[in-house]
């Protein structure tokens, strides 16, 4: 909620119970400062507006920012996340949150991926959707080409790859990088893997068969972030 109110022009109006306003007076204050109407209502109204089983007593109506590919892959970008055909909203939202935490400059959800403004995706992003540019809709191959044109090394994550993340030295991980992640069930198609500079697997040392997409993304993004920050 705070993030939506802080992002210029995003929030249109807020519906909230008196309990929320009394417990978090900074929220109606932030709404007032942003010129966003704070509309007091009953819990039943909030429940009707929300799609969660246990609503938190406050709902914001927001505009959907229109983010171009060039905004997510800007000149000088150091770390970018590309999601190709990622359809699970919880995974997508969590990857947006992880990308934000790792200091990424942008996220791109390719054509065929879940809507970034799907309610579950928005909740899973925990506000990070409003912290960095998230572009949606381009063809995944075009996104990879744009990343390479911007001078980014493209690393594709694939559990079946011969090269392991541990095999990459800190110098490789420290360069400006776009990480490419595929669908939760079937991964990356061969044509996208072929476009990457390197295809990398997150090593599994235990008996788990595989890693959840958002978990694998966290490992990969933080490997790059650590190398970039130590190197910088």
Image (spheres, rainbow, N blue to C red):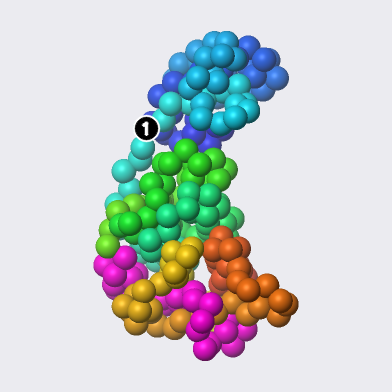
Residue 150 location (% of width, % of height): 33, 70
Residue with the most extreme right position: 206
Q: Which residue is the site of mark 1?
A: 63
In the figure, residue 71 lies in which quadrant?
bottom left
Residue at figure coordinates x 41%, y 41% from the top left: 117
Residue 122 location (% of width, % of height): 49, 41
Q: Is residue 188 left or right of residue 208?
A: left
Can you say whether 19 is above or below 179 in the image? above
Q: Nearer the viewer, residue 173 or 61?
A: 61
Magenta span of residues? 140-167
For the question of whether residue 145 can be seen, the reply is: yes
Tell me if residue 212 is in the magenta stretch: no
In the figure, residue 151 lies in which quadrant?
bottom left
Residue 30 location (% of width, % of height): 55, 24
Q: Is residue 194 left or right of residue 31?
A: left
Q: Is residue 143 left or right of residue 210?
A: left
**Dot 1: few (<14), some (14–19), or many (≥20) neighbours within 10 Å?**
few
Residue at figure coordinates x 63%, y 28% from the top left: 54
Can you say whether 126 is above or below 210 in the image? above
Residue 231 location (% of width, % of height): 59, 76
Can you say whether 35 is above or below 97 in the image? above
Q: Nearer the viewer, residue 19 or 10?
A: 19
């Amino acid at each position: 909620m705070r993030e939506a109110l802080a992002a210029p022009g995003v929030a249109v109006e807020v519906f909230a119970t008196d309990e929320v306003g009394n417990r978090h007076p900074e929220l109606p204050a932030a709404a007032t400062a942003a010129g966003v109407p704070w509309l007091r209502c009953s819990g039943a109204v909030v429940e009707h507006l929300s799609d969660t089983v246990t609503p938190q007593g406050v709902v914001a109506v927001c505009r959907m920012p229109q983010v171009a590919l060039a905004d997510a892959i800007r000149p000088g970008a150091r770390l970018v996340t590309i999601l190709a055909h990622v359809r699970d909203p919880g995974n997508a939202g969590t990857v947006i949150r992880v990308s934000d935490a790792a200091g990424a400059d942008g996220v791109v959800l390719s054509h065929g991926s879940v809507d970034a403004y799907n309610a579950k995706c928005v909740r899973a992003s925990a506000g990070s959707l409003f912290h960095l540019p998230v572009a949606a809709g381009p063809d995944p191959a075009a996104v990879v080409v744009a990343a390479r044109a911007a001078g980014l090394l493209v690393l594709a994550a694939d559990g079946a790859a011969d090269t392991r993340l541990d095999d990459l030295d800190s110098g490789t991980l420290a360069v400006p990088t776009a990480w490419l992640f595929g669908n939760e069930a079937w991964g990356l198609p061969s044509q996208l893997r072929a476009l990457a500079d390197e295809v990398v697997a997150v090593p599994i040392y235990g008996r788990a068969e595989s890693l959840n997409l958002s978990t694998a993304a966290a490992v990969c993004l933080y490997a790059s972030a650590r190398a970039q920050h130590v190197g910088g």
